[in-house]
Image (tube, helix red, strand yellow):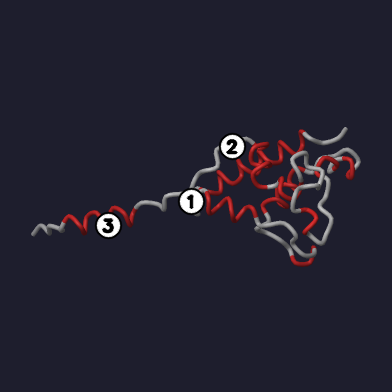
Amino acid sequence: MRMILPPCTIIALLLAAMPALPGEPIDSTGQENFVRYCAACHGDGGHGDGPVASAIAKPIPDLTRIAARRDGKFPRQIIKNSIDGRWHIDAHGTQQMPVWGYEFWVTEGAGDFSETRISQILDGLVDYLESIQVR
């Protein structure tokens, strides 16, 4: 015996099977994302002089001197993890920055497929930060 489903039930089942549609995807360069997400605190040039920096109790670091503070070495994975922020370890102190990894995850659709996009966005930001290092 064949069961015939009403059209509204078929549509509901199809919609339920589809992944959630993401918000506006982040299709920007690392520099564009830096200006969009980071410059308010870190400044357009990354010197820690953004328009809201004075409202934050702790001084905002100069991101152009990351490598200089580490004997010329730029710690890509540490910087990527710091921007992401989802795996913060309480023993390392308080979290000052927003948890951008979560924000990017939601923006990219909040699914398992979002992890690839988050990694690409973070890599772009890290590439940009590495490019502005004072040598």
Q: Residue furthest right?
A: 71
- Residue at image mark 2: 28
Q: Residues within 10 Å of mark 1 (few under 14, many from 20)?
A: some
Amino acid identity at mark 3: Leu
Marks 1/3: CA–CA distance: 20 Å
Marks 2/3: CA–CA distance: 34 Å
Label 2: state its secondary structure. loop
Who's the residue at 84% across and 55% down the image? 59
Label 3: state its secondary structure. helix
Q: Nearer the viewer, mark 1 or mark 3?
A: 1
- Residue at image mark 1: 109
Marks 2/1: CA–CA distance: 16 Å
Say whether marks 1 and 3 touch (CB < 8 Å): no
Label 1: state its secondary structure. loop
Left or right of residue 9, residue 84 in this image:
right
Q: Residues within 10 Å of mark 3 (few under 14, many from 20)?
A: few
68 is higher (above) or lower (below) than 110:
above
Q: Nearer the viewer, mark 2 or mark 1?
A: 2
Who's the residue at 76% across and 47% down the image? 50
80 is higher (above) or lower (below) than 135:
below
- Residue at image mark 3: 13
Question: At which x and y percent is residue 129?
Answer: 75, 39
Question: At which x and y percent is residue 84?
Answer: 67, 52
